[in-house]
Image: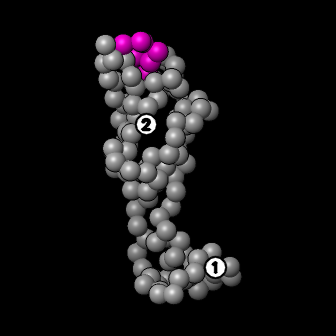
Amino acid sequence: MTCPICRKLEFAVHLQPADPKVPDEWSAIGKSLGIVWHAPFRVDATNALKPGANELTFKVTNAWVDRLIGDQQPDVTTKYTFTDVKPYTATSPLLPSGLLGPVHLHSIATQ
């Protein structure tokens, strides 16, 4: 990602996914930006980004429902979840997860 306004004192820089579904851990250039798990699904990257090219990393957590469905698959030898009620089967549809869509860069004037 190229950031032409990074490190200019008059701007704060925030990153925001277009369509968040599950918690994500974000980092830029190896610096943790935090975990995005609730609205407004935005992280402050002001102190992490540098002018020019930047490498962003996203660690996406899968939905708990998908883990429950995964444990119901017929070839599973180790189950990772336990529930008294089994609302999902091996054929239940998985929920969308991952980075679904673009990441928006917002510059916010600070002065």
Mark 1, secondary structure of its residue:
loop
> What crowding class fits label 1: few (fewer than 14 Cα within 10 Å), some (14-19), or many (20 or more)?
few
Residue 70 marker: none
Above or below for 56 versus 108: below
Q: Is the magenta stretch mostly helix, strand or loop?
A: loop
The magenta segment: 3-10
| Residue 98 on image: x %, y % | 46, 54
Q: Residue furthest right?
A: 77
Mark 2, secondary structure of its residue:
strand
Residue 38: tell me if it is visible: yes
| Residue 2 on image: x %, y % | 45, 23
Q: Which of 9 and 71 is in front in this view?
A: 9
Name the quadrant of the C terminus.
top left
Check whether the beta carbons of the residues at disc 2 and disc 1 lie within 8 A of each other.
no
Disc with the residue nearer the chain's start (2 vs 1)? 2
Q: Residue at x 39, y 31 (%)?
A: 14
Residue 103: tell me if it is visible: no
Answer left or right for 67 relative to 6: right
Q: Give the residue pinned by disc 1.
A: 79
Q: Which residue lies furthest to the front in this view?
A: 111
Q: Residue at x 58, y 86 (%)?
A: 74
Q: Give the residue pinned by disc 2.
A: 43
**Amino acid on which disc 1 is placed:** Lys
Above or below for 100 versus 1: below
